[in-house]
Image: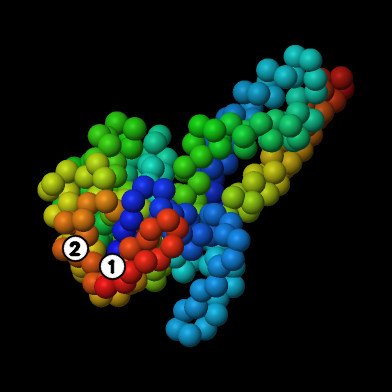
Amino acid sequence: MAIQGKNVSGKSTLIKSLFGTYKANKLEWTLNNKEQGKPSPKNEIIAMLPQDSFLPRNLTPSKIIAMMYKTHKNQKPLFSVPYVSDYSLKKMSELSHGAARYIEIIVVLHLWHPFILLDEPFSLLAPLHKEVFKKLILEKSKTKGILITDHYTDDINEIATKRILIENEKLTSVN
Amino acid sequence: MHIVFLQYYRDTFLYNLVFSIFISIASNFFICFLTYGSLVSFIAYQYHKGNEYYFYHNYGYTKLELMIKTLVLNAIFTLILFLSIQCSKLMFII
């Protein structure tokens, strides 16, 4: 599902509220017709890719993957994604913005959470990375609920099954 | 103690240690490390690496949980360091 809208329309705020890092005045959400409590990262239901870089800059992707995915079995799918091995031994601070963003997306998409929120994942991505990302997102969407916000309409249209438009902090259309 | 948390602890520990050593010129190192040194380390982390909290959130840690665990570990570190210094002083006297 994609959320689209102009800048400052409230897309990121909505995503942060769902993730539990922004305190909304009122937020009610249900999962399988069951009302859920206060959103919190502790629930481990939702993972999130924020707009800005979030992986520790002093670590290498290889070290980060080993920290987050304990077993070799869980780590293997990440290293089998194209280009990940090429960047895995450089520190995050040494990677280009595009490569660092690519690694972040791959790490988040492989998390165990059933829902994933991606805040502007296409920004800074190289065309080759975009293609891999689109394939991966289509594959992951078979088993996970994925919510994306972005300004790259063409890219979004290729992968989104449902689109929501937000204007002036209000939901205006769904298709 | 999970390795993901230890990464956060390592970052805040360094801020706290540098600040507490600097402040210990005029004040007690141990009190500073346990109290306002810890507070300064959280503020410095938020300022320099605030977005990295999402790394820990995605692993299931809340900001409050990270801070409480850090304070507990700081207390243990301070106690061990304090006792070690006292023991070595005592051994030196004997």
| Numbered tag placed on residue A163 in the rendering | 1
The subunit carrying tag 2 is A
Q: Observer-nearest residue: A167 or A149?
A: A167
**Residue located at (59% from left, 73% from top):** A37
Question: Which residue is tagged 2?
Answer: A157
List x then y, in percent, for residue A62.
Answer: 31, 46
Report the side of B4 relative to A93 (left or right): right
Q: Which residue lies furthest to the bottom in this view?
A: A33
Vertical side of A175 occupied by A64: above or below: above
Q: Is residue B76 visible?
A: yes
List x then y, in percent, for residue A32.
Answer: 45, 83
Report the side of B87 relative to A80 (left or right): right
Q: Observer-nearest residue: A56 or A11?
A: A11
Instruction: Give the class, few, some or many, for how many residues have Cα within 10 Å of label 2's Cα (few <14, many ≥20).
Output: few
As measured in the structure, the alpha-carbon distance from the residue carrying label 2 to the one carrying label 1 is: 8 Å
Q: Can residue A147 be seen in this view?
A: no
Q: Quadrant of the N terminus of chain A?
A: bottom left
List x then y, in percent, for residue B64.
Answer: 64, 51
**Residue located at (36% from left, 47% from top):** A7
**Residue located at (68% from left, 49% from top):** B68
For the rendered model, the colour scheme is rainbow
Q: Which amino acid does label 1 sit on?
A: Arg
Quarter of the rendering containing residue A167 = bottom left
Vertical side of B25 occupied by B86: above or below: below
Q: Which residue lies furthest to the top in this view?
A: B25
Report the side of B48 relative to A26 (left or right): left
Instruction: Give the class, few, some or many, for how many residues have Cα within 10 Å of label 1's Cα (few <14, many ≥20).
Output: some
Q: Residue furthest right?
A: B94
**Residue located at (82% from left, 28% from top):** B86
